[in-house]
Image (cartoon, grey):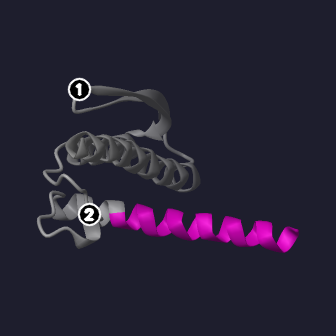
Amino acid sequence: MEPTRRSQVTTEKFENEVRFVHKFIQLYCDKNHTDCDKKDGQLILSYHNSDLGVVNYHLCEACEKTLKYSHQRLMECPHDEKPRCRKCPHPCYEKSQWKALAKIMRYSGMQLGLLKARKLFRK
């Protein structure tokens, strides 16, 4: 019974990670790439033969590549219990991609934090 439970948690964590990364990349692209041509697309989520749905996006080409790269890295993560990428003993991101994603995560994290603070003060 235990292996099934771990597998289910891993699948849920995978889906949450992809949706989390998508949300941050979408926010970053919307705020910083306003003058770029953007296109609509779908990222099909499947993990260990489980269909998890799709993620719809409206991104510029560079951000779309970052999203797809991150999705691929998450799909290939060798850990049963996925650690945070920052604390991973065997990072799978290329250095340049890691720096680009870190910049996106920093920016979007700050924006989401500011949005929460604004909502608190408006109440």
Task: Please tell me which of labels 1 and 2 falls first in the chain.
Answer: 1
What x and y, as percent, mark residue 12?
38, 43
Tell me the amino acid under the disc marked 1: Asn
Q: Quadrant of residue 102?
A: bottom left
Q: Position of residue 103 (x, y in %)?
A: 39, 67
Q: Residues within 10 Å of mark 2 (few under 14, many from 20)?
A: few
Q: Is residue 109 magenta?
A: yes
Kind of element beneath mark 1? loop
Q: Is residue 3 left or right of residue 107?
A: left
Is 95 part of what is drawn in magenta?
Answer: no
Q: Is residue 97 left or right of residue 115?
A: left
Mark 2 sits on what residue?
83
| Quadrant assignment for the N terminus | top left
User: Which span of residues is magenta-colored?
Assistant: 102-123
**Residue under the point 44% across and 41% down:** 60
Residue at (29% x, 48% y) in the render: 70
Secondary structure under the numbered disc 2 in the rendered image: loop
Residue 105 at x, y = what percent? 43, 63
For mark 1, does the 10 Å Cα neighbourhood hold few (<14), some (14 to 19), or many (20 or more) residues? few
Task: Check residue 114 in the rendering and tell me which mark sits there, or answer none.
Answer: none
Residue tagged 1? 49
Report how far apart the C-alphas of labels 1 and 2 lie in the structure. Answer: 22 Å
* Residue at (32, 40) in percent of width and height: 8
Quadrant of res 99: bottom left
